[in-house]
Image: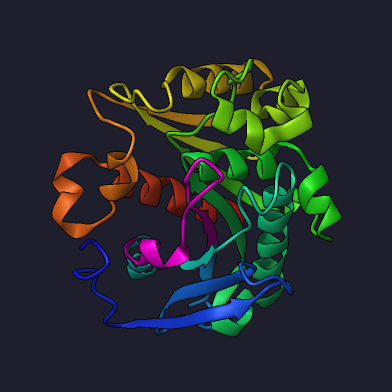
Amino acid sequence: MLNGIATTSGLRIAQGIPYGSEPRQVLDVYAPDGARSDSAQSAPVVVFLYGGAWQTGSRALYRFVGAALAERGFATVIPDYRVYPQVQYPAFLQDCAQATAWASAHAAEHGGGSTLFVMGHSAGAYNAMMLALDDRWLGAAGLDARRLAGGIGLSGPYDFLPIRGADIRAVFGSAANDPSTQPINHVAPGAPKLFLGAGTGDTTVRPGNTERLAARVRAAGDSVTLRLYPGLGHIITIAAFAAPLRWTAPTLSDVTAYLRQRSADAGR
């Protein structure tokens, strides 16, 4: 329903572009129609990673996110990535890193500029924070993590050991109790400037994950924008990007403000 009413007027959309050889290694790009990489009209690039407990999800479900960000001037890349049971940790991180490296190399073909962000919701926020904070993944994909202008996490799990649910233990397999799987354990001075948001009414991923990660980032001397939305649940932090639901939470306007400020900073 949210996709059905998402306006795509004035946007350029490219769908089903492969970034790897596997069936789920494909992505869509949403860009402002007037964006040109060789001019002042180049668009900052956002790679959006969706959630689904690393077991479900489809880029097609998030057209409303791509359209909302593109309408606001951002070239938005939404990849699919392999999920359990086809793969276990860390294959989904490797796919997300590969898609981000593709965005860095090819976004100019869609009007994208050199300013690059990773963004995610729920399990996708975990993926985004792992790429932003643990340079192993982007480095293995041939992209310097310092290339990121910032990272955005909405309602993400960042500090969730011990893993209690059997379904999530299966996703992480032999690494289920490994501290290196946790984004919070990769915070170090010099991390990208982050935006972290969560609803205080989230019972799927407790907002304490967001609060603890923000505190760790600040303790390391890094910059983080923290937004806690009173009473908001898990899904609405991203669903509020859709026009009919924007009244429920200012997540889109908050993320847009962060992206614009960071893009301006990166351009100085």
60 w.r.t. 121: above or below? below
Q: Residue at x 48, y 66 (%)?
A: 76
62 w.r.t. 18: above or below? above
> Residue 220: where, in percent of width, then height?
69, 20
Report the quarter where the N terminus lies: bottom left
- Residue 54 in the magenta stretch? The answer is yes
Give the residues in magenta: 46-64
Q: Residue at x 58, y 20 (%)?
A: 160
Q: Residue at x 41, y 84 (%)?
A: 34
Report the quarter where the C terminus lies: bottom right
> Residue 83: where, in percent of width, then height?
61, 52
Q: Residue at x 65, y 34 (%)?
A: 170
Q: Is residue 190 left or right of residue 32?
A: right
Q: Toward the viewer: 114 or 167?
A: 167
- Residue 164 in the magenta stretch? The answer is no
Q: Is residue 99 left or right of residue 236?
A: right
> Residue 196: where, in percent of width, then height?
47, 33
Q: Toward the viewer: 260 or 144?
A: 144
